[in-house]
Image (tube, helix red, strand yellow):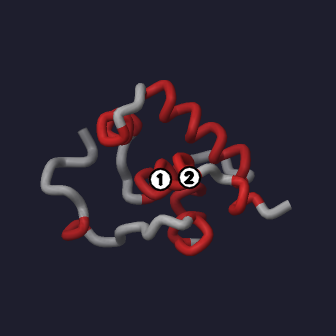
Amino acid sequence: MNARDELTRQEKVVLSLVAQGWRTAKIAQELYLSPRTVETHIYHIYDKLGVSSRVEAALFALQNDSAVGTEVRRNSEDLPHDNPYD
């Protein structure tokens, strides 16, 4: 089973933002979702990738940009000017 191919488009976007260090509330605001929906996406990401933390999921995303399908920004200059950690 190739877990990377099983992520939905929305899960890939959420994973990319998690890898950038964004918190659930900020992801929800950015994607116009409820925090609970974002948490559900994160739970599904963990399950599909066989990981148990945001750190493990972020490491997967950083190591597999092409598999995630969304480029993960690696420096603060690429982040929006508002604080993504609120």
* Element on which disc 1 rests: helix
Residue at image point 75% right, 58% down: 3
Quarter holding residue 74: bottom left
Above or below residue 73? Residue 39 is above
Q: Which mark is residue 13?
A: 1
Residue type marked 1: Val
Residue at image point 48% right, 48% down: 14
Residues under numbered marks 2 and 1 in contact, where contact means CB atoms less than 8 Å apart: yes
User: Quick check: can you spot residue 63?
Assistant: no
Task: Describe residue 77's horizontal placement relative to residue 61 as left or right.
Answer: left
Q: Report which residue position mark 2 lands on.
A: 9
User: Quick check: can you spot residue 5?
Assistant: yes
Residue at image point 36% right, 48% down: 22
Residue 82 at what x, y percent from top left? 15, 49
All told, the count of numbered labels is 2
Quarter holding residue 85: top left
Q: Gap between marks 2 and 1, in whole Å?
A: 6 Å
